[in-house]
Amino acid sequence: MKLPARKALLALLLLATSLARASSSLVLTDGQVIKGTEVARQGDSYLVTMAGGNTVAFPAALVKEIKFEDDPQPAAAPGFVNSKPQNLAGPPIPPQDPSQALKVFGAPTEWSKSAVDTTVVLKDAYDPNADVMAGSRSTWSKSAVDTTVVLKDAFDPNANVMAGSETKWAKNAVDTTWHPTDGFGFKPLSFKVASPNAGAPDATTASGGPAPWNCAESFFVKDADRPATEKDNQSPSLSVRSVKSPLYASLGLPLYEANGTIDGAPRKAVFTIAEGTCRLVGGDADAVIGLNLSSDHAMAQDAASLNVALSARGGARIPPGVDKVDYALAFVSLTDPLVSGSKGAALKLIAKPEELRSLAGKTGGTCALSKGKRRKEERAASKSFALPKITAGKDGDVVTFLTWSSVGGMVYRDTVVLAHGGVVSAKREILASHVGDHKD
């Protein structure tokens, strides 16, 4: 990679957290259209941010629908077509049934039975049915008088002695019958949003799939088993906007960011819409789906959902002119909940030794380690430094690079595999911690 291209990459990283807002508007019940740069719901009111920066509130009863307009998809480069795989010539060939292809292997191999039965069956020499003490045991003779005491209950179970004073219970006015449900309470990673009744705000997009606003409502419901249209099941506040960060542009997916409240705490969900389904691909994934996940497990959840969304668009196809290191960095940044979530941590690519030394020289006052231990961590990071590398493997390209996170001052070695089948996988290794200006 040339030096000017690396400087451009650094500028993209500085702008990674910036968001360009798409045009949004409210359609009132009397037909008026209120246009603004952002629409957010706060309780029973919709807040519209106008072009000049002023915010105007409209009661929810006066709002007929919400329009959320994205920038048009850029035209394909010369010689390329943005579509799914096509049959360019000849009659269409139906996909092969995998079961037909496996028939050539025949039945599975079976081991022949041994000619000698080597099974050992242990036999207990003690016979529990034989009374070995029968010849010497003393026996008691039956008493001539039966001294058995038989108690007789004086209470007659057939007589209701409390009939005159017993309490009569009436049927409860409220049905308190308990019906068991899923005790874990997990939310799914994706939602098939049903078409709501007439008059619901911005139910579907022009392509027939769910709108970003309805996806956000579904992710932030209090009870996943109840409809998101019920008022008491919605987040107290909610805002939705398009993600236009240059860092994520190389992924080629339309991304949206939703900010809402879960259990009284502000949370963020980054999602996309693929084949009519809302898919969670970043943000505070563990809180949104109701799981207590580690950072690595949350990244695996987001990566799996992101691969499904990429598959709906033909797989992870790197656009022309996009560096594979930039694509891999965008994939790791989006799936890392500490970066794309509400914490908003910075994740920087370390491409040169000078960049690592520059980060180590900026020491904040919040680190809990002593200076001696911090220097030891910095030396460990320097010894493990390696330039970004792209290796062509049998199953795909393997991209290896170092990153630094402002949470914990972690220095990671990230390995991203860009498989030929269009699937992306990532794993990371911690090389050092408490490096640079960070938050513990």
Image (tube, rainbow, N blue to C red):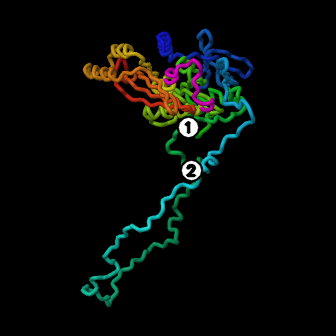
Q: Is residue 363 above or below residue 339?
A: above
From the viewer's perspective, is 309 left or right of 119? right
Q: Nearer the viewer, residue 311 or 117?
A: 117
Query: Which residue appears at 53% of the width and 45% of the height?
Result: 182
Q: Amino acid at mark 1?
A: Pro
Residue 157 place in picture, x, y as percent: 49, 71
Residue for badge 1: 188
Q: How many marks?
A: 2
| Mark 1 or mark 2, whichever is nearer to me | 1
Residue 70 seen: yes
From the viewer's perspective, is 154 left or right of 191? left
From the viewer's perspective, is 94 left or right of 257? right
Residue 316 highlighted magenta (yes or no): yes
Secondary structure found at label 1: loop
Residue 308 place in picture, x, y as percent: 58, 34
Residue 103 highlighted magenta (yes or no): no
The mark nearer the N terminus, 1 or 2, is: 2
Magenta segment: 311-328
Q: Label 1 vs label 2: CA separation? A: 27 Å
Q: Residue furthest bottom?
A: 144
Assign the C terminus to one quadrant of the image: top left
User: Mark 2: few, some, or many residues within 10 Å (few <14, many ≥20)?
Assistant: few
Residue 405 place in picture, x, y as percent: 41, 22
Residue for badge 2: 177
Magenta: main secondary structure equals: loop
Q: Are marks 1 and 2 in contact (CB under 8 Å)?
A: no
